[in-house]
Amino acid sequence: MANPSTSSAETRKRLFTGLQPSGQLHIGNYFGALKPFVDTYQDFDSMLMVADYHSLTSLKDPKVLRENIIDIVRSYLAAGVDPKKAIIFKQSDVDEHTELAWIFETLVTVPFLELAHAYKDKVAKGLEANAGLFNYPMLMAADILLYDTDFVPVGADQRQHVEYTREAANKFNNTYGQTFTEPEEIILEGVGIVPGTDGQKMSKSYKNTIPLFGSKDEISKAVMGIVTDSSGERPENVYAIHKLFKSEAELAPLYEANKGSYKALKDALVEDIETFVAPMRARYESITEDEIKKVLEEGGERAEDLAEEKMKEVKKKIGVTI
């Protein structure tokens, strides 16, 4: 869908997105979720969440998780998000997320959750089929619905999760009365699914990523590992990633002049990624941990105020408020 617009402070809609601190951010995270947020967030009442509880489905190392949380907030700020114009917070700092997820889990069925594409795909790829992974869509629904979200920028592969969120809202509204806004997804045209170095969706789980804030050497190593098809004149996996950084019109003469020369095309891709990333990487390296902790503390307080108010309404609707 096209990016929605707003006309005044009175009609501003809420935009919500989040990224898991399950590993180093890669260019797929940037183009699939972070860039759509950066491009639109100032037109909305925007919220940007560190999905730390979601990451527990695959990440079990406390030290690494703490480091990743710091890293992901630093990445948000380096990418251009102003914490004065968006609420940046940690999922785990707002208890209402898990509380509301449980309520939604009592409204949906096991067969309904079994249909989730992301769950089936991750299990097929060898990820442990733990209950958290299975119930992931309902925690994601709680994340979004707690804040009366109107729009959610996601990768195309996450579209179903937003559909599940609408279903959770619908089931609650039908059971207890109108309570939740049913959100719409925003998918950036052309980059909803960012390809990885092996041609599959770029994902930390698949170990096929190009680091967003890696050094030039790290970027080069990842790019040189892109799987190529030796039967063609144009390496399609290289080209699919290259289109994120330059238009097809700009790339046409480069790929025409280097037919069959995969090394030259990969070198060109490295340079274009480096040119794009270098200014953000400089900002990234200048942000201190103290700054990050302050952003999360202030954002957590603002998110908690909103979530607490919403849960008062929910508890009254379901009958637990005496």
Image: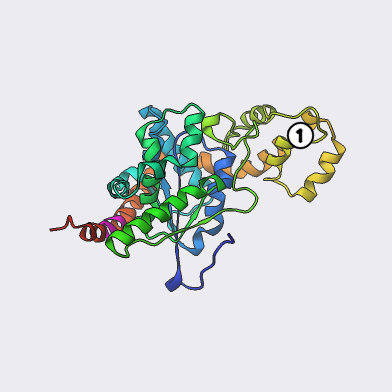
Kindly state the secondary structure of the residue where label 1 is placed: loop
Q: Residue at x 50, y 43 (%)?
A: 75
Count of residue discs: 1
Q: Residue at x 83, y 31 (%)?
A: 260
The residue located at (54%, 42%) in the rendering is: 29
**Which portion, as a residue range, is magenta?**
307-311
The answer to whether 55 is drawn above or below residue 39 in the figure is above
Q: Position of residue 97 (x, y in %)?
A: 32, 48
**With 169 as the anchor, is 190 left or right in this view?**
right
Q: Is residue 309 magenta?
A: yes
Residue at image coords 82%, 41%: 254
Q: Can you tell which quarter of the image residue 172 is in?
A: bottom left
Quarter of the picture containing the N terminus is bottom right
Which quarter of the picture shows residue 114? Answer: top left
Q: Please tell me whether residue 39 belongs to the stretch shown in magenta.
A: no
Q: Position of residue 320 (x, y in %)?
A: 17, 55
Left or right: 316, with 287 as reference point? left
Between 301 and 262, the one lying in front of the other is 262
Which of the pair 48/170 is nearer the observer? Answer: 170
Residue 135 at least partly seen? yes
* Quadrant placement of the C terminus: bottom left
Provide residue 110's location: percent of width, then percent of height. Answer: 36, 41
Label 1: few (<14), some (14–19) or many (≥20) C-alpha neighbours in 10 Å: many
Task: Say which residue label 1 marks.
Answer: 235
